[in-house]
Amino acid sequence: MDLQGALEILKRNGYKYTGKRKRLVEVFYRESRYLSAKEVLDYMQADYPGLSFDTIYRNLALFEDIGIVEATEWQGERRYRFCCGGDEHHHHLICTFCGKTRTIHVCPMNAILGKPEDFDITGHKFEIYGTCSSCKTDVAVPKM
Amino acid sequence: MDLQGALEILKRNGYKYTGKRKRLVEVFYRESRYLSAKEVLDYMQADYPGLSFDTIYRNLALFEDIGIVEATEWQGERRYRFCCGGDEHHHHLICTFCGKTRTIHVCPMNAILGKPEDFDITGHKFEIYGTCSSCKTDVAVPKM
DNA sequence: ATTTAAAACGTAATATTTACGATTTACAAT
DNA sequence: ATTGTAAATCGTAAATATTACGTTTTAAAT
């Protein structure tokens, strides 16, 4: 997914094309990593000082619905990132310090033989957590 | 893991053997499914009316540390279940309505060839979510 | 330009988790 | 059995994350 694609999804689905939404898309595009609602608000408030949480959460939910961002949760917080890679199903290596990701081209669901009985599958999650090289350095050599 | 095993872990690690902890272990053993802190408190308050959240959360963290329960989070809540299956690494099918699980004997990490560069892996998660047969019935035929 | 439904504001409520001083209790040493 | 002590729990409050709502503003169609 690219910037234009995301903006077109907004238009195509008939949602209003506000400056804030455009900016929100840009934030996710530029960062291309998992962000918490708080982090998103901080970025947005640089341009829109009085921006409220209501707007953030409402639009995060909307963006997730229409496929502009994908979400997950770790360490008790829900986190969102720009949908990467067109429509192909994928998974992530995630740095739990900065939220940066690397795509994994393996899906464990392919190894599940047949459908389980008496169980309707609605989704699955495969994520590898760790520390990326730049965060590893930061931790080893704390800033002073 | 069985009931005795869990109680012995407590003793072996030198933690005090209180009635509440014994009861907590029993709750997890009996339910053998994922429970939220709120659910655990409800079960416990049947026997200990005035029990506080502090005690619940403190002991959940302890139990997770010493390997009596394992934890995950979904729908914005952290959930805990009795450690199933001795020491063997495993994953779960999880009913997101009742928390019941089924063990999966496939681990996607085996399919990851070699270690990724510039990334220290600290953990991973593979979970399949869905609705178990009894919850499916409950949803289809709402109680009146 | 006017209209209108959607979006955002400002603020409050809810839910979950964590924290802390005071009190009680399990366990060991006497 | 009694006593001493560190750990566990209580009661309550604070911190954090998320959701809700009436009012006002705004994008976009008429």
Image (spheres, coloured by chain):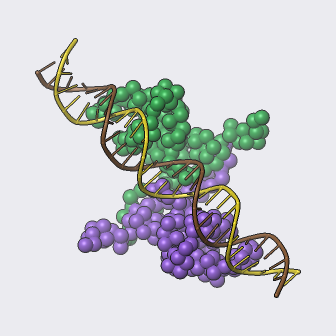
Chain colours: A purple, B green, C brown, D yellow
Query: Residue A112 at x, y = what percent?
Result: 59, 52
B100 and B109: which is toward the camera: B100
Q: In this view, does B127 lie above or below B2?
A: below
Name which residue lies at 47% across and 27% down.
Answer: B48
Name which residue lies at 62% across and 55% down.
Answer: A123
Does B24 sit left or right of A60 as displayed? left
B7 and A78: which is toward the camera: A78
Query: Residue A32 at x, y = what percent?
Result: 51, 75
Does B73 sit left or right of A12 as displayed? left
Q: Can residue B136 be seen in this view?
A: yes
Name which residue lies at 30% across and 71% down.
Answer: A137
Query: Residue A129 at x, y = what percent?
Result: 44, 61
Quadrant assignment, res A110: bottom right
D27 and B88: which is toward the camera: D27
Does B47 sit left or right of C28 as displayed? right
Q: Can residue B29 be seen in this view?
A: no
Q: Is residue B77 above or below residue B43?
A: below
B19 and B27: which is toward the camera: B19
Name which residue lies at 58% across and 45% down.
Answer: B94
Quarter of the rendering occupied by the N terminus of chain A? bottom right
Q: In this view, does C3 lie above or below D7?
A: below
